[in-house]
Amino acid sequence: MKSFGLNKHEKLKGVKPISLLFKKHEIETAFPIKAVFSCKSRKNDNIRIGFTVSKRKINKASGRNKIKRKLRETFRLNKSL
C-alpha cells in the first residue's frame, strides 16, 4: 500500500458520509477557502476532510476545482505530520 495515499476511510464518497461530516464537524476558514473536517472515526484516528471554495471570489468552476485539488494533494502529502 502507498504510504502517502489516501486510504478508504479518508476518502469522502457518497451522500451519507458527506452529510455526516457536515453534521459533526470542525471548521477552519480563510476566505474564500473553508476546510470542514472530523478527527474521529469508527475504527481508528483517521481524519476526514472536505474543502469548499467560495464562488464569490473564484468565479470559474475550473479555478475552484484547481484550488481544491491542490488542497487535497497538500493534505495527502502532509497527513503524516
Image: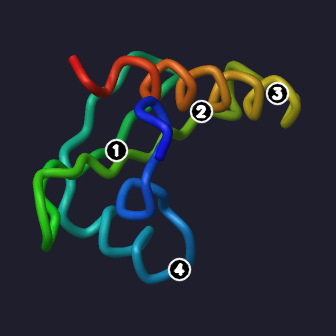
Image quarter (top left, top right, bottom left or bottom right) of the C terminus: top left
**Residue beneath label 3, please?**
59
Q: Residue at x 54, y 40 (%)?
A: 52
Badge 4 or badge 3: first in the primary sequence: 4
Q: How crowded is mark 3: few (under 14 residues within 10 Å), some or many (20 or more)?
A: few
SS state under label 2: strand
Residue 40 location in percent, x, y? 11, 57
Q: Which residue is drawn at 25% across and 69% down?
A: 23
SS state under label 1: strand
Badge 4 or badge 1: first in the primary sequence: 4
Marks 4 and 1 close (CB-CB < 8 Å): no
Residue 15 - label = 4
- Indicate the quadrant where residue 72 lies: top right
Residue type (three-letter) at the residue carrying disc 4: Val
Residue type (three-letter) at the residue carrying disc 3: Asn
Residue 36 - label = 1
Q: Distance between the residues labelled 3 and 2?
A: 10 Å
**Residue beneath label 2, please?**
53
Q: Is residue 8 or residue 17 the one in the foreground?
A: 8
Marks 3 and 2 close (CB-CB < 8 Å): no
Residue 50 location in percent, x, y? 45, 46
Q: How far apart are marks 4 and 1 (CA)?
A: 15 Å
Residue type (three-letter) at the residue carrying disc 1: Val
